[in-house]
Image (tube, rainbow, N blue to C red):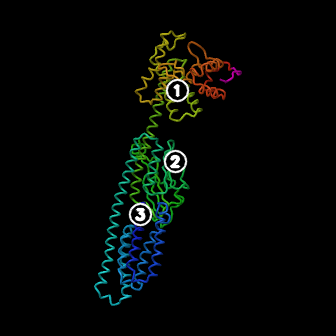
Amino acid sequence: MNNKRHAELLIVRVRWALLATACVMLEGSVALPYIVAIAAAVAAFNALVWRSTQTSEMYITSGRRLANIGRVLDFVVITLTMFAPGGTSSNTYLLYIVVLVEAGFADIKPRNLIYLTAGSMAVFFSASMHQHPAALSTIGLWTKMGLISTGWVGGMYVSATRIQDATGRHREQRLNAIYETSLRLISGEDINRILTQILRTAVNEMNATAGYIMLTMPDDPEQLATEVAYSTNSDYDFPRSLRFGEGMAGYVAATGQPLLLNSTDTEGQPLASDLSLAGSTAAVIVPLLNRFANVAATKKNQEVIGCLVVQSSDRGNPFSEDDLMLGRMLASLISVASANARLYEDMSQTFLRTLETLANSLEARDEYTRGHSQRVCDLSLMIAKHMGVCEEALDEMRVGTLLHDIGKIGIPDAVLNKPGRLTEDEFNQMKRHPVIGYEICKPLGLNEGALMLIRNHHEKLDGSGYPDGIRGGELPLSVRIVCVADAFDAMSSRRPYREVMDEKLRLEQFNRFAGSQFDPVVVQTLKQLLREGKLDEMYADHWTNVERDEDVKYAA
């Protein structure tokens, strides 16, 4: 579209030069008032075309139509001049050559260029016969008509060259777009950002109006839901969900075959509204195929995981086979990105379940700490969500808390389950479990946030914790939250050396050490959860035999 607009701007400049040349050529052979009137009209119209071709939006709205009218007026003005007194005696006929070359710049169809050339020659012949009937037998007449025909040669050459150059640039641009999109697949970006960028590329490269990507639901492989949508028009409406076989996207998903539709394929009528493409005049719909899925049970060699839909509401911009090919290429990239995201999600869930099993197996060694890691995980997430922690940090916390005590696997049972107070040497052995857990989990490829939770969940604000003695602002919020949750769960459950602390004593401990050992803001959040009774169910089995002191105040 921009290439055509720039060509029209060039034609407008040529028309200014054409107007000035015509005025010079006609001076003395055509009446001056006639020259002035025609020149003024052409100049005014040319200025209008120039103004309406400054931006792509203006060109689509009115510039393209005015430019076509301008070419017709060029032909009409030259024709009228030819029939004016003295018109054929000048070199006005040469202006037809310029008009024919202009048509080549405007990418006019070859057939229409032949018609325009024949019309120019016919007009010149008629005007010559009208003013000089005896000129039929002169060589000059036929020579001049031959010169007009060179305009057709020039127009055809310009048109062919422009088409070739435009095709080359267009393909290069699309290859660059595909290359840039491919790089995003290995960039580690969020899947929604990747899909949105691919969709924008599809809409922009096809000069379309809008588009959307629908993916199958994990729990219902024949239900499509819109994952991302993009439009150059804010009023654009897209389907939220479809069943296989429902609407055009559902039809493509059901058949697994791409579809190219233009309004010209339906006798100039817009696509039917019951196909969920109301208001559009063209559409490319491509299925998203996961060719690596295990579909042996369905006897297929691929699985449909969604659809890419690109639509246009511009009647002057129908989609081509090249657009369909681009859609298929981008759909392949979308399929890879979606399949990888789902595979990663499945692997993450499997990994997380494995970690949970490992933690539960470890805690099964000690009846006093059974379920401790899961409760610390649940309580930490509850506090973090209440404090507005981001989703990425929540994921780190979920993994880190489930494994925070895994290092106890390296602590002797005699120390781990000792019913009495630990000696200094035994306590030093116990203090090794965060580092042991860190060394165990480091080769697993966990991110730094989760590893820090495993290593530093016994740190304190004043730096008296272990193993690294980190203090104050060096402790991330996620670590501060887990430190409070871990201590609270230890106080709220039975140990070999004591029973469950009653509520009053627990609160005294947190009030006493808030600001030195524990983050006071995290402690306040914990107290609010206690006030609202949100921990009662979690600790129902541990607090059953402990009298709750209703007079306890949750003030700092």
Q: Out of 456 and 83, give the one closest to the viewer.
A: 83
Q: Which residue is mark 1?
A: 473
Magenta extent: 549-556
User: In x, y percent, where is residue 205?
Assistant: 42, 55
Question: Which comes before the other along the chain, label 2 or label 3?
Answer: 3
Q: Residue furthest left?
A: 139
Q: Position of residue 156 (x, y in %)?
A: 33, 69
Mark 3 surroundings within 10 Å by alpha-carbon count, few (fewer than 14), some (14 through 19), many (20 or more): some
| Residue in the picture at 66% in, 18% down | 504
Residue type for callout 1: Gly
Q: CA distance from mark 1 to mark 3?
A: 60 Å
SS at mark 2?
strand
Residue under pointer 3: 4
**Is disc 1 placed on a helix, strand or loop?**
helix
x and y percentages locating residue 343 in the rendered image: 43, 39
**Quarter of the rendering occupied by the N terminus:** bottom left
Q: Amino acid at mark 2?
A: Ala
Q: Nearer the viewer, residue 438 or 377?
A: 438
How far apart are the two marked residues, 2 and 3, measured between alpha carbons?
37 Å
Q: Is residue 69 above or below residue 262?
A: below
Quadrant occupied by the C terminus:
top right
Query: Is residue 355 found left or right of 523 in the rendered image?
Result: left
Q: Residue furthest right?
A: 551
- Residue 310, how many percent across, how many down? 47, 55
Residue topped by disc 2: 225
In the image, residue 474 lies in the stretch drawn in magenta: no
Q: Nearer the viewer, residue 529 or 543?
A: 529
